[in-house]
Amino acid sequence: MEQDRSQKTEDQILALADVMETGTMQHARSMLNELSPAEIANMLEALPHTERNIIWEMVDSEKEGEVLIQLGEELRSTLIRDMSLQDLVNATEGMDTDDLADFIQSLPDRVTTQVLTSLDTQNRERLEAVLSYPEDSAGGLMNTDTITVRNEVTIDVVLRYLRRMEKLPDNTDSLFVTTRDNLFVGTLPLTTILTSDPELTVADVMKRDTEVIKASMEDDEVAKIFETHDMISAPVVDENMKLLGRITIDDVVDVIREEAEHSVLGMAGLTEEEDLFAPAVPSARRRAIWLGINLLTAFAASWVVSNFESTLEKVVTIAVLMNVVASMGGIAGTQTLTLVTRGLALGQVSRSNRRWLVNKEIIVGLLNGIGWALVIAAIAVFWFDDLQIGYVIAAATIINLFVAAFSGVAIPIIMQKMNIDPAIAGSVVLTTITDIVGLFAFLGLATLFLL
C-alpha cells in the first residue's frame, strides 16, 4: 500500500512537472488543486526545498489549512514561517476542532492569539477545551462536533431533526444520547434510526453498552479500543461521564501511523517529524547527537579489546574472527528486542507472562546459538585448520546469543518501568551489551585455551 502511494505521488509530480514545462502555470495550478489536501501534502514532502516552495505558492488559499495539517511538524513549521499573519488566520477557517488544536500549537504566540480572537465564542470554547488536554491524550484527539439527542424523544423526531441539518459531521455513524445535564447515556446508530419504528422512543432502541473513552486516556490506548471493537467513532467523557466530544477513525489512523513511524525511526535516533528533504546542516546537527552516543558504546567495546592485546598479538586468527560473535549477538538480540517492544506497545506483555516470555526467548537463543555455533565453528576450522579455534568461537557464540536473548526481553521491560522509550534507547543499550559480552567471551576464552 505504501509502495502504491509512493508510486502515485511520483506520477503526480512527473505529470505536474510536464505541465509546468510545456503548458501554462494556470493549467498547472488547476491540476494541482484538483488533488486532495493529503495528496498535495505527500507531494510537498517528496520534493526538495526549491521545488517545494514553487508548488506551495500554487496551492489555493482555501486549501492551505487542510494541506498544512497533513504535513509533518518540521515541514509545516518551515512553511508557516514564510506565511503572513492574515494568511495563517485564513488557513484556520473551516478546520475541525481537533485539527485546529494540532495546528495552532505550531503557530507563534502572536498568531495563536489572533486565531483565537477570530473565532466565535462557541468555537473558541470548544478549541480551548481540546487544548486543555495533552496532545497525546483522548482529550487532545477529540473533536467537539457531536450530535446529541434525548432518550425520551421518538425516532420520528430524531429523523426530522436530522433532515433539518445541512450535513452530518464526517464519520458520523451514531448519535450520542445524553441527559439534560449532558451526561452520556448511550448511542443511537444511524442504521437503527433508519430501520426502527418511528413511534418508538430513543430509549427503546439505543445501545447502552457503548465503549466510552475517558478524556485522560493515552492515544495508543484509544487506538487499541478502536481496533478491538471495530469502531468508527467513540464518545469522549470526563470523570463524571459528561460528554465532551468524540474521536473518529481518521484520528486513530493518524495515531497508528505515528506510532509505527516512531518505532522505526526511533531505533535510529530520529523522530517521526524528520523532514527527508530538510537542509543538510540542521539534519546533521540532529543526527550528530545519536552518533555521539554510539561513539561512546564503540569506545566501550574497544576498551574490552584493549585488555586482550597480548592475546591478539599471539593469535592473529582471533582478530579476524572476533567481530563474528558480536555481530551474531547483535542481530539475535535485535530480533527479540523488536518483538518485545512491539508487544509492550500493544499491551501483550504483562507481569503474568513475562517469566514465560523470558524462558521462551532464552530457549530460542540457545537453540540458535548451538545451531549457528556449529556452523561458525566448522567454517573457522576449515578456514584456519585449527580445531581449538572452532571450540572457542562456538562457545562464545552460544554465550552471546544466550545473553542477547535475555537482554532483548529485559531491556525494554526495564526501560518501560523507568519511563524510557525502548523504541529509541533500547537498540543502543542492547548493541553495547552484545558487543561487550561477545568480545569478552571470545577473547577471554581464547586467552584461556589458545595461549
Image (cartoon, grey):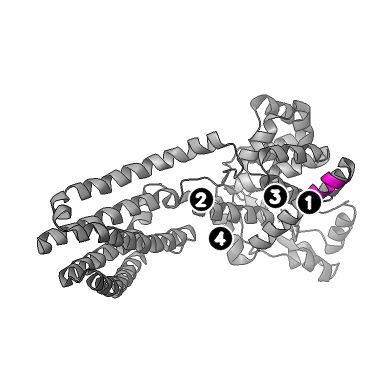
Q: Residues within 10 Å of mark 2 (few under 14, many from 20)?
A: some
Q: Amino acid type of disc 4?
A: Lys
- Left or right: 137 with respect to 424? right
On the question of residue 228 being in view, the answer is: yes
The circle drawn on residue 441 is: none
Given this view, does label 4 or label 3 mark the residue nearer the observer?
3
Give the residue at mark 1. Answer: 36
Q: Earlier in the sequence, mark 4 or mark 3?
A: 3
Q: Residue at x 56, y 47 (%)?
A: 272
Disc 1 from disc 2: Cα separation: 27 Å
Q: Earlier in the sequence, mark 2 or mark 4?
A: 4
Q: Residue 421 at what x, y percent from top left?
A: 43, 49
Assess whether mark 4 and mark 2 are in contact (beta carbons under 8 angstroms).
Answer: no
- Quadrant containing the C terminus is bottom left
Q: Earlier in the sequence, mark 4 or mark 1?
A: 1
Which residue carries the number 4 mark?
224
What is the secondary structure assignment of the residue under circle 1? loop
Q: Is residue 21 magenta?
A: yes
Q: Secondary structure at mark 4?
A: helix
Residue 235, picture quadrant: bottom right
Instruction: List the residue tagged with mark 2.
Output: 265
Our reading of the magenta stretch's main secondary structure is: helix
Marks 4, 1: nearer the viewer: 1
State the CA–CA distance, disc 2 to disc 4.
Answer: 22 Å
Provide residue 277's location: percent of width, then percent of height: 62, 42
In the image, 369: left or right of 283?
A: left
Report if the CB atoms under discs 2 and 3 are less than 8 Å apart: no
Give the magenta range. 16-23
Tell me the quadrant of the picture where the N terminus can be found. bottom right
Cα distance in 3D space between marks 4 and 3: 27 Å
Residue 139 lies left or right of residue 361; in this view the side is right
Look at mark 3 in the image and give the residue it sits on: 42
